[in-house]
Amino acid sequence: MRYLILAISLLIIACQGKEHPNIKLTEEHQKALNSIQVMDGFEVELVAADPLIADPVAMEIDEDGNWYVLEMSGYPLDLSKKGHVKKLVDTNQDGYPDKSILFADSLTLPMGIMKWKKGILVADSPNILYLEDTDGDNIADKREVILTGFSLSNPQHNMNSPKFGIDNWIYLGHSGAINSFSYENIFGDKGKEITFAGNPNAPKLPQNGNGRNVRFKPGSFEIESLSGETQYGHTTDPWGRRFYTDNADHLFHEVIDARYVNANKNLVISEAMSKIPDHGDACEVYPISENPNHQLLTDIGVVSSSCSVTWYDGGAFGKDFKNVTFIGEPTHNLVHADIIESKGATFSGKRLLEKKEFLASKDPWFRPVNFYVGPDGALYVVDYYRQLIEHPEWMSDEVNKSGALYNGSTKGRIYRVTKKGSDPMDWMKSVRLSEKSSEDLVKLLSHENGWFRKTAQRLLFQRGDKNIASALSDVVRSDAEYGPVAALWLLHDWGILSPKDLEHALKSGLEGVRENALQLADRMMQKPGFKGNLALNESLIKLADDPSARVRFQWICSSSYLSLPKMAELKAKILTKDIDDHWTGIAAIASSQGAEYELLKFSLKAMGATASEGKSEFLGYLAATLVKKGDTEFLNLAIDSNPKNDWWQAAILKGVAEYVHETHSELDLSETQKESIARAFYATENNELRGSIIRIFANSTLPKNASIIAEGNKKASTSANKELQASSLKLAALSKTPAIEAQLVGLLNRKNPEHLQVAAITSLPKILKPADLNAINQAYSSMAPKAKKEWIKYMLFNDTYITTLLKEVEKNNIPKSDLAWPQFVE
């Protein structure tokens, strides 16, 4: 089946389908095809549809043009193993499928498929399955569990999308289990240890892999957690840089690998991923759906169901698509595209098109949930085709009970998107890579189409034919754009990557090759008996001054494992140059296990004269890492009465304060340190510094020398500085004495300045004496407006007092109109 849209333009003119000469076009399929509009210069054809397939969620094309489609018929609630793998067959040799064979059944909620050896891998939580047809009847008669232990949670959050990586690992998308409130009985599983089935002595991961993406090697029983997570789908650029997606946050970059995060066990970071769209989270989208089926919690008009991020590497769309990613947005019946551009250690994503989408449908049942870049360079769009795509967990009871949950479950389509005038699909009859020699496969490592590169690399890895080492070395030393990286990783995995080849790669004119060469260098230098040479060391040293910010960032990451002369000096040079790149600072801390204090002293000496946001961030993370390590001596550096230093004092103490607050840990300070910090509080004019000191003392204790606080508070009360007055009150409140509590309550009337009333409320203890609670409620009408708002917040977000608040509202002591609408709903 194929139907060609003849005229599609940016002006959104009418679409016409073209019937394949051997297929009778149904009215339903023609209508669905005609509803699609695509970017100018492209065309769409329907190449597979019901009844050949139903409920498709993923596809795979193997080295011989065999086409597998994964079907998840059980979504959203049916766990009775209705999932399938279909094999599509072209019986009349016209290049298009006209028959489907049930390759495998009895899958629960399958969410990914990948060719592996003589069979396929299927992601079907809690397992990764290996399915193989051993007798040539196109039906899988061999079924093995490879990995097990993943949670069987809400299907929108299960493990998914196995993909073969540039480094010869198999990568899985994973974001961990979620709490199900309405369907806990079927989706309450939180997973177990992730293990290789049948091999209790193999490495394993903690329960559900700590909710992170996972990579593994079946042959050598290796498994690791990554530093990032994704919801459904993940992708890489040609150099192995990883990109993820998650509902409203449609594009992430995993900036720093787990290998480098784990180099410093005390490293404190909030995230190893960067949100890269320049158009923000939950960005606006431009659907053309007619009578859309939006549900109770659907955010209309913005990305809310992003999935299956896919880097286009097919080579057939022209140079403008060399750095483009696609995501499915099934809730809004469209495909969104971004252009990815370098931005320091990470990237930025900007819209491919303004005020329109790459592909969209008027049909509200069109549900693009996955993509595949084929041997022909076409983009294949997997359309789940359902009336409802949201999960019942987030829909109204009325819809859930309407009987419509599975409407469309016998349908499904796969569309082929190509440049106008492209040749018909013929890879089903022409692709036969398994018949090629290893030497011929090596040549394909440099192919412009990523499908050929990845497939050739997988086949070479599986064959393990070390006789092609010389041919791979030639690729490494060539000026090919893509082949050298794959060749490097193959040689490395086989243990035959020579220092000479690595040295050549380090000198490559391509940023991505140099970056991968650094990753390989830090691995090789960790191997027992590795013998480098002066030329290799010189090449590594030169990269510390590389023109590429990403290569310099990788150099700092790799420095955890490199052994070179003047390492500290080289790292300091990069850090000083790139300090305003958030990720460079993180990498510097990660690579400084055991030397964090020395890094702090160097940073203050080299960069302490002038402030910047990047420096402040870096110092905060470094301070938090030192506290986690159990080192508080460094705080003596941050206690300085020189006002020129208050910016970095504030940065350091803010990092400390945030760490102890987030981890609910107590800070072990000496009395001398407490007194110095308290004096710094009253000496500074930096409000942020004062705020950090308050949070630090909230997780420690005030100095035993109470006169410091008392005298400081007395002076502050007569100051014209309102911020100092308010913050001094908050600091004094940490003493939690009856006198200070009485002072706070006594401030809550119109006689006192508004800023002090607000400070008093935000300083109140969590549990008040009944008399104090009544006194404040009685004084409510005389409070300043901002103080009233703070008092409502205090009671609303304190479970103990919600009932009290409701009673006060009922008695009209607190007017309903004083509550904002969200608070009233709450």
Image (cartoon, helix red, strand yellow):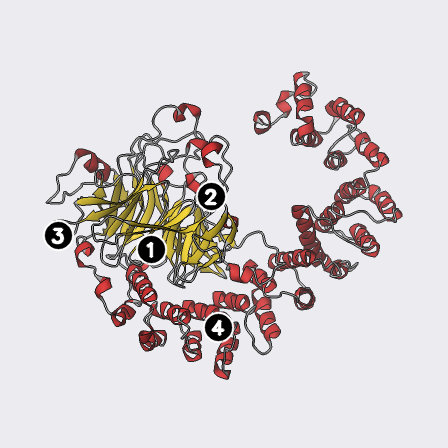
Question: Residue 45: x and y, percent?
Answer: 21, 46
The answer to whether the residues at label 4 and label 2 have Cβ atoms under 8 Å apart is no
* Viewer can see residue 57: yes
Of residues 523 and 19, the one nearer the viewer is 523
User: Which residue bears the numbered disc 4?
Assistant: 524
Residue extending farthest to the top is: 811
Question: Residue 495: x and y, percent?
Answer: 42, 73
- Please tell me whether residue 474 is drawn above or below residue 436 in the rendered image: below
What residue lies at 70% left-to-right and 30% top-to-bottom? 791
User: Which residue bears the numbered disc 2?
Assistant: 151
User: Which residue bears the numbered disc 3?
Assistant: 93
Q: Earlier in the sequence, mark 4 or mark 3?
A: 3
Q: Earlier in the sequence, mark 2 or mark 3?
A: 3
Q: Amino acid at mark 1?
A: Tyr
Of residues 79 and 289, the one nearer the viewer is 79
Q: Amino acid at mark 3?
A: Gln
Disc 2 to disc 3, C-alpha distance:
43 Å
The answer to whether the residues at label 3 and label 1 have Cβ atoms under 8 Å apart is no
Q: Earlier in the sequence, mark 4 or mark 2?
A: 2
Disc 4 to disc 1, C-alpha distance:
32 Å
Q: Amino acid at mark 2?
A: Ser
In this rendering, would 447 be left or right of 712? Answer: left
Tag shown at residue 312: 1
In front: mark 4 or mark 2?
2
Q: Secondary structure at mark 1?
A: loop
Q: Amino acid at mark 4?
A: Met
